[in-house]
Image (cartoon, grey):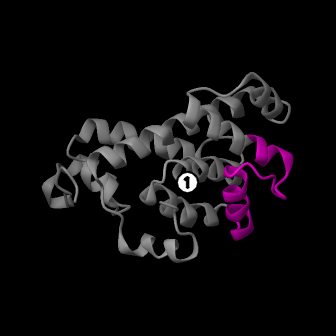
């Protein structure tokens, strides 16, 4: 059960109601602080719709963070979102295998991005070697977008956990195919 109330459009000032268009529990809780919720939304929207980073690779990095942190909410939401941006079931299975330290059939750049996401999530920073491997394939702008995406979603999973935000039933269905290990 969430630690703060989920607000509905009638509960917030008209200028903040657009934040509730997605109708997710995360947004309904964040609008308790409309200014911060809007800033959060702006970063998330930039990542999803304006970043120059390949959307499939972006979603794989986000999925890696959610899976590694066992964030049911984040992982299940981004399985659905990721599929809108080209992530396949094979990609998701490969991400799980890579998490266990076994090389998958993913292309080298995707494997390196997953490794970088694991390094930043587990140990604060991406190693020199991993950064250099990824940088061989991405522009400076894409590198900044990747690092900030991984960092942002590390923050998101911590917000979800601390605020005890409930996952919506529609997203829980993903767990039938991809149960998160205890």
Q: Quadrant of residue 93?
A: bottom right
Residue identifier under label 1: 67
Q: Is residue 108 left or right of residue 24?
A: right
Residue at horizontal 52 percent and vertical 51 percent from the top: 66
- Percent across and percent down for residue 62 are 58, 49
Taking 146 as reference, is 114 above or below it? below
The secondary element bearing badge 1 is classed as helix
Looking at the picture, tell me which residue is in the foreground, 84 or 17.
84
**How dense is the environment of label 1, judged by Cα within 10 Å: few (below 14), some, or many (20 and up)?**
many
Q: Position of residue 137 (x, y in %)?
A: 84, 36
Residue 24 at least partly seen:
yes
Looking at this view, name the residue that lies furthest to the left.
Answer: 11
Horizontal placement of 143 versus 159: left or right?
right
Q: Where does the image place residue 49, in percent across and percent down from the top left?
A: 57, 49
Say which quarter of the image contains residue 119.
top right
At which x and y percent is residue 43?
47, 39
- Residue 80: say if magenta: no
Residue at x 62% of width, y 52% of height? 59
**What segment is highlighted magenta in the picture?**
86-112
Which quarter of the rendering shows the N terminus? bottom left
At horizontal 59% and vertical 43% (from top left) the residue drawn is 50
Q: Residue furthest front?
A: 182
Q: Is residue 90 on the magenta stretch?
A: yes
On the picture, is 51 further left or further right than 102? Answer: left
Residue 63 position (above or below residue 170): above
Q: Can you tell which quarter of the image residue 7 is in?
A: bottom left
Viewer-closest of 37 and 178:
178
Report the side of 116 relative to 65 (left or right).
right
Does residue 148 show up? Answer: no
């Amino acid at each position: 059960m969430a630690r703060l109330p989920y607000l509905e459009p009638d509960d917030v000032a008209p200028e903040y109601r657009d934040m509730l268009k997605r109708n997710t529990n995360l947004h309904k809780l964040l609008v308790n602080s409309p200014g911060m919720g809007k800033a959060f939304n702006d970063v998330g929207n930039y990542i999803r719709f304006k970043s120059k980073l390949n959307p499939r690779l972006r979603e794989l990095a986000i999925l890696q963070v959610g899976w590694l942190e066992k964030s049911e909410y984040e992982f299940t939401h981004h399985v659905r979102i990721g599929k809108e941006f080209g992530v396949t079931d094979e990609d998701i299975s490969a991400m799980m295998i890579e998490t266990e330290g076994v090389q998958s059939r993913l292309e080298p750049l995707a494997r390196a991005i997953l490794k970088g996401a694991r390094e930043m999530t587990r140990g604060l920073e991406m190693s020199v070697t991993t950064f250099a491997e990824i940088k061989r394939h991405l522009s400076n702008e894409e590198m900044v977008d990747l690092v900030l995406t991984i960092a942002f979603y590390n923050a998101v999973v911590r917000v979800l956990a601390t605020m005890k935000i409930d996952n919506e039933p529609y997203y829980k269905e993903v767990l039938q195919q991809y149960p998160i290990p205890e």
